Amino acid sequence: MTRQRQGIWKAALYAVLLLILGYIALLMIYVSGSNRSFSEMESSMEKVIDTTGMKKLDGQMLKRNFGLNSTDYEGVMYYSSESSIDAEEVLMICVKKSSQTEQVTDAVEQRVQERKKDFEGYLPEQEKLLEEAQTSVRGNYIFYVVSSKASEYRAAFDQSL
């Protein structure tokens, strides 16, 4: 192999290595959690979310709607529409250990499927909101939102970490 080809191979190897390192760095930034406390996160999100027509629900309603016990988690923020014919809801949970994440995301997915059945053929605009629901898992935080502003709320959640 000539010196010129060896130089090209080395440059290509370094370029690929840099791309891999860059990808790993971005991945670490994206999936990393937060060192912010739950109360700080809750306060931050409550400033962003339009709670008009919504009510803050307690652990009993979390159990009823998601099958989750609020005492099992570091913190829970749960808002839902005051009207039973509106699918809008916002849930943020900070798990105590990462092994709880799958349980919460499964419960969220089950909730979405159940709510879709509730509105199917009855209120298509609410069914569409459920189809466009946003869920984000970042470190120990899980954020779920059904709203016409779901993308905006999710972006605010991702940025607040």
Image: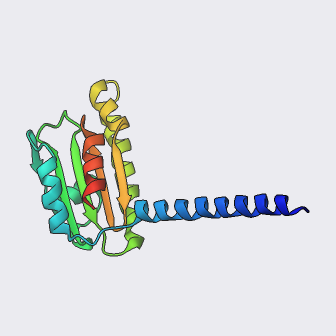
Residue 122 in view, yes or no: no
User: Image point 30% across, 75% down: which residue?
Assistant: 96
User: Image point 15% across, 57% down: which residue?
Assistant: 44
User: Image point 9% across, 48% down: which residue?
Assistant: 55
- 79 relative to 140, above or below: above
Residue furthest toward the right? 1
Q: Position of residue 118 (x, y in %)?
A: 30, 35
Left or right of 47: which side holds 124?
A: right
Q: Position of residue 93 (x, y in %)?
A: 26, 62
**Residue 14 falls in image quadrant:** bottom right
Residue 68 in view, yes or no: yes
User: Image point 29% across, 59% down: which residue?
Assistant: 67
| Residue nearer the viewer, 70 or 18 | 18
- 159 relative to 148, above or below: below
| Residue nearer the viewer, 77 or 139 | 139
Which quadrant is home to the N terminus? bottom right
Residue furthest toward the front? 3
Left or right of 26: which side holds 39?
A: left
**Residue 161 falls in image quadrant:** bottom left
Number of numbered labels in the structure image: 0
Q: Position of residue 17 (x, y in %)?
A: 64, 64
